[in-house]
Amino acid sequence: MSELPKARIATVSLAGCFGCHMAILDIDERLIDLMQLVDVDRSPLTDKKRFTTRCDIGIIEGGCCNEENVHVLHDFRRNCDVLIALGQCAIMGGLPAMRNAIMHSDAPLRECLEEAYITGKYIRNTTHNVPNDPALPLLLDDVYPCSEVVEIDYQIPGCAPGGDIIFDTLSKLLTGKFRGFEREMIKFD
Amino acid sequence: MDNGQECSNGLSSTACDVGAVPAEEIAAICQTFGNDKHRMLDILRAVQDRYHCISPSTMDRVAAETGLTRIQVEGVASFYSFLSLTPKGRVTIRLCDDIVDRYAGLAEVAAAFEEVLDIRMGETSADRAFSLEYTPCIGMCDQAPAAMINDVVLTRLTADTARALAEVLKAGRTPDHLISERFAELTPHERATRMVDNNIRHAGEVLLGPVPEDAGLDKAAAMMPSLIIAAIEESGLRGCGGAGFTTGHKWRFAAAERAEKRFILCNADEGEPGTFKDRVLLTERPHLLIEGMTIAARAVGANEGILYLRGEYVYLRELLEQVLEDRRRRGLLGKSIHGIRNFDFDVRLQLGAGAYICGEEGALISSCEGLPGEPKTRPPFPVNRGYLGHPTVVNNVETFCQAARILDRGADWFHAMGTEGSHGTKLFSICGDCLNPGIYELPYGHTLREVLEMAGGQDAAAVQVGGPSGTMIARDSFHRKLTFDDLATGGAIIVFNGERNILEIVEYYMSFFVHESCGYCTPCRVGNVFLQKAIGKFRKGLANPEDIDYLKELSGTIIETSRCGLGMTSPNPILSTLQNFPLVYSAVTKPNKDGIRDTFDIQSAIDGARKIAKRRSYIFDRDFTQ
């Protein structure tokens, strides 16, 4: 196995809570086995901010809630052969997408920001302003699942997915043996 | 609920608060219907007719009078599209928004009304004189574009006539005056035929030819009930509403059930776009229909019947009430019909309020019971436990009419017409791009090409048989036969010529199902929206080849997991066009090379935030300051 060139993996957390990346660490000591098979390129785990080379697999945590998420996701699509949406936010929008439920409003985004920063009951914001630093990316009108922005090849469900399913799926994908999930692995109740 | 909340959900408003509707008037309306919760639809219709709004306080009052909770009343009031929780104008103009009307110039007609009345579609004028809105097919496709103005139907509108009509209404005349200056002096039948043409193009032997009055009932009265059922079974009569269940079996099952009470329901809720055959029968053969219902009552031992008339056909109410009254007077309805002891039967007219789903028999029963028109779980079937839990026969208008004729002329006569498995004649309502739209009564077994030639629709490039829930077929299949086993239809045949955009038609039909889904089952409520969006992608040229698989897969899920016929047939416009017009789809798909979705439009997605932040996007907008 070790003679084969290692696969290159990139990961990113978009509109997620970083829980899915924590779940990657739940692979525990099997990480050592996995590292025999892969090199990690752009990723919070390596702190590489840019792609140094084209990757085989890109792992996306979180959906798209702002323009930067979209930009990064486009970048991943262009630089990775296979994209995996990891966890419920990447697949469906998840918890952040709850703001999509503000529907019966003429300006749902403004309503959301005002409640979050100004009018909310438990808000202590002495500036009484919505943050608007030029460095802040613009928010999207809705929170989008990754599959609405780019084509996604695989989805690993869970919030967060367990270390087992991540390890199992990755190692099968890397060895070309992935044939879908075992029912027991994605049965949560 | 405090006042603040009531205002925030938009239901309360000064224009229709309790001040305008005295509680005793509401109580009086409820009293008219015996404070019966099962007559909720009638009560709310009456409130709507008189006050043009069902306000929160009204709902409270109605709930108190009928012994229900407010939310139960609101459930009904918010379900039907002709009932309104917000104030509507004294004159409500509903333009029929069917695809046939659109192709016949609906847009110009709508613009004319908007211009003269100075309101947009969907709005109510500030003085509450007019409301202008769209409504799905009102069954006038043979004389499109059509509109309902309160209870008056107007057809073959043009921009000019629409402008003139609107001026007359604006001058304060009532909608009746649009039909005739001496409307009050006309008989109900004259009124109906002045408003709407029958357009009977071909009268067949069974229904639209000469029909001797009550000959079937005379014979049935002398027969044992079981022999009536046997005759209907032998005739091979199958339901004409679309599903084609054997009528005789249905009656036999209902008769076999041990029960104290049984009911006969007539389904006159023909909401399938492009279908208008029942409209003609109700206008021209109302006695035959009630005769058929009476025979069914005799056969299964029912004492009560309900004629469920779709809200769009309210212009036929007077005519039908008159027919019922006339038959009561002549002893053909009521106690001891034909002098036979225990042969008691009477029919009440139940008006719907604009809900396609009520054509489904379970939903129709729910609606008659005063509930929101939601289908019921089957089994139990209505013949076992239907209206208020009693065995119930629900048949289409045409089916009852044919049953009456079979009793008169005999099962063999009927059985000899048509083809094996599809006996007798059928009313076809043909509309769209043909020279002679209208009603054709033909024996089963004609090919579609023959029928199109009769109707002058030789140019047809696509024909929708059976309405949106039926099949769209192309020229290469015009040799197929109109029978239950080949091309089954409840009657609708909609003709489209080569200039029509198939995807536009499909998108319209999907929006129809999105609008008409009762919302009970998620696959139907949500899935149809997804299908509609996906078709939108095709129309915009943003679809990938994989989207075709997506359409098929999602359609399969909706069909498999919906409870009633609506969800089981709503993907049909897509599935049948995918099958019969595959090139229409493949012509507008293009493979996606870089894996980035064209359907996601970053500019529109960040537009709102750009306005809130009052700055450009540093990623997606160019900097013009440099």
Image (cartoon, coloured by chain):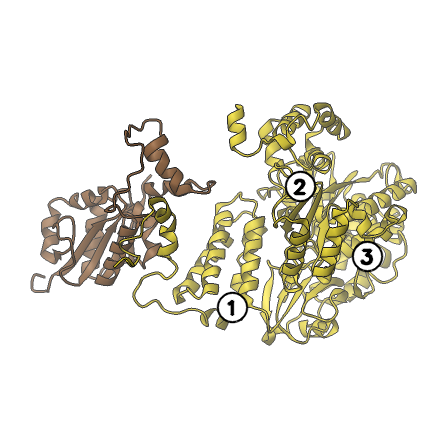
Left or right: B228 as drawn, with respect to A25: right
User: Three-letter amino acid code at disc 2?
Assistant: Ile
Instruction: Return the chain for callout 1.
Output: B
Pointer 3 local density, CA inside 10 Å: few below 14, some 14–19, many at least 20: many
Label 3 and label 1 in one chain: yes
Q: Is residue B35 left or right of residue B205?
A: left
Query: What is the C-alpha distance between the residues marked 1 and 2?
Result: 35 Å
Chain that appears yellow: B
Q: Are marks 1 and 2 on the same chain?
A: yes
Residue B579 tag number? 1
Q: Is residue B271 left or right of residue A50?
A: right
Tell me which numbered mark, 2 or 3, is placed earlier along the sequence: 2
Q: Is residue B612 above or below residue B11?
A: below
Kind of residue indicated by mark 1 = Gln
Above or below — where is A92 with respect to B507? above
**Residue B89 quadrant:** top right
CA separation in Å, label 3 and label 1: 39 Å
* Residue B562 visible in the snapshot: yes
Residue B310: percent from the left, percent from the top?
Answer: 71, 47
* Place of residue A114 in the rendered image (x, y in percent of width and height, measured from the top left): 36, 36
Kind of residue at badge 3: Ile
Q: Which residue is rendered at x = 31% and y = 68% of the image? A: B593
Would you place residue B545 above or below residue B118 in this image?
A: below
How many residues crowd around disc 1 within 10 Å: few (fewer than 14), some, or many (20 or more)? few
Image chain in brown: A
Q: Which mark is residue B365?
A: 2
Disc 3 marks which residue? Answer: B406
**Who's the residue at 15% across and 53% down the image?**
A49
Q: Which type of secondary structure does the marked residue at label 2 adopt?
A: helix
